[in-house]
């Protein structure tokens, strides 16, 4: 039986059995695979790196979406950079928002995710509140004159087309697109194996935002323990919204989650010592 081997790191890798291959091709931007694994359900990889699996996608998509949206409390305009599988979009559309702009560089990721990972978007690509643009997120934030209450950067790792989304220039332009009181969150890797990504992002975000920090979530197929999610805003109180207030907002939003709870939200900003050490050394 064929195996998928993720070789994101030099000395360690993880393997998933390919029980059924749905799609494998080089797109205009990256190598895209979608296959079925008996344990994980359907799996998407880009350039040999696991992007999402049906089994654990709920953890990442709920934490990347509901933490900023419920902390903000009155988000109406959301910008998603990347996220071609549609999982973030699905979670965003559960909220009482007016408009969501999604800027994804690779049309093939959207097309193949719609076809082979339909549960990720769950119809959200047909939501009338969505504007989907196939473009480089860097070019979009550089050229748009619109602002957003929430910016969610659901990118690949800083390799290939995703690399530009971890630069000072991108963060500076994204800051320009953030409405007063808004917050940007970013996919920021697994610090246990990618400490430099945590340190570099922190240094770059600190230059632009009054409050640049991280929160965490454990995504089983993002190998290496806690994943760090970047948090950037000028409102220093936004990360301190109490679990009681968040509970009220979640009750008002009237939907249930499989990972997110107001208590997990509040606790997710407490970093383990090894991450704090990376940030100060
Ligand atoms: N959850 C995954 C993770 O944490 O690694 C990311 C999933 S999502 C599939 C990543 C998306 O970012 C892909 O669809 C990819 O095409 C998109 N992407 C990469 N670079 C981009 C860029 N410069 N502009 C817009 N989208 C980009």
Image (cartoon, rainbow, N blue to C red):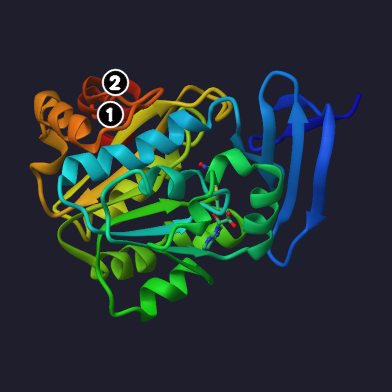
Point 27% across, 37% down: residue: 67
Residue 244: give x, y in percent of width and height.
Answer: 10, 24
Could you tell me which quadrant the C terminus lies in? top left
Residue 104, can we see it? yes
Point 45% across, 34% down: residue: 60
Q: Quadrant of the rendered structure where residue 179 is?
A: bottom left
Q: Is residue 168 above or below residue 67?
A: below
Viewer-proximal residue, 129 or 274? 129
Residue 191: give x, y in percent of width and height.
Answer: 44, 32
Point 34% across, 78% down: residue: 144
Q: Is residue 18 above or below residue 205?
A: above
Residue 222: give x, y in percent of width and height.
Answer: 55, 30
Secondary structure under tag 1 reads: helix
Q: Is residue 133 left or right of residue 276?
A: right
Residue designated by label 1:
276
Residue designated by label 2:
273
Secondary structure under tag 2 reads: helix
Q: Is residue 207 left or right of residue 127?
A: left
Circles 2 and 1, Cβ within 8 Å, touching? The answer is yes
Residue 191, can we see it? no
Mark-to-mark CA distance, 2 and 1: 5 Å
Q: Is residue 132 left or right of residue 109?
A: left
Mark 2: C-beta under 8 Å from nearest atom of ligand 1:
no
Mark 1: C-beta under 8 Å from nearest atom of ligand 1:
no
Q: Is residue 158 left or right of residue 22?
A: left
Disc 2 residue crowd, few under 14, some 14–19, many 20+, Cα 10 Å: few
Q: Is residue 203 above or below residue 38?
A: below
Disc 1 residue crowd, few under 14, some 14–19, many 20+, Cα 10 Å: few
Point 30% across, 47% down: residue: 202
Could you tell me which quadrant the N terminus lies in? top right
């Amino acid at each position: 039986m064929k195996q998928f081997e993720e070789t994101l790191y030099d000395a360690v890798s993880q393997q998933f059995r390919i029980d059924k291959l749905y799609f494998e091709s080089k797109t205009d931007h990256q190598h895209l695979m979608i296959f079925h694994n008996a344990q994980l359900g359907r799996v998407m990889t880009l350039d040999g790196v696991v992007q999402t699996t049906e089994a654990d996608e709920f953890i990442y998509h709920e934490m990347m979406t509901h933490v900023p949206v419920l902390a903000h409390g009155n988000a109406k305009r959301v910008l998603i950079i990347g996220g071609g599988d549609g999982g973030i979009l699905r979670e965003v559309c559960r909220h009482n928002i007016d408009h969501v702009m999604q800027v994804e560089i690779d049309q093939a990721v959207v097309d193949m995710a719609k076809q082979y990972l339909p549960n990720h978007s769950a119809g959200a690509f047909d939501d009338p509140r969505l504007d989907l643009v196939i473009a480089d997120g860097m070019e979009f934030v550089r050229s748009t004159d619109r602002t957003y209450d929430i910016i969610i950067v659901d990118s690949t790792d800083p390799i290939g087309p995703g690399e530009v989304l971890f630069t000072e220039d991108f963060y500076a332009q994204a800051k320009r697109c953030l409405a007063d009181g808004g917050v940007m969150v970013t996919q920021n890797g697994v610090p246990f194996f990618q400490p430099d990504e945590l340190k570099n992002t922190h240094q770059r975000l600190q230059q632009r935002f009054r409050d640049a920090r991280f929160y965490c979530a454990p995504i089983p197929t993002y190998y290496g323990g806690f994943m760090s999610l970047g948090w950037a805003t000028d409102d220093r109180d936004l990360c301190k919204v109490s679990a009681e207030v968040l509970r009220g907002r979640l009750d008002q939003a009237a939907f249930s989650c499989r990972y997110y709870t107001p208590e997990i939200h509040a606790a997710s900003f407490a970093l383990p010592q090894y991450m704090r050490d990376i940030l100060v050394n």
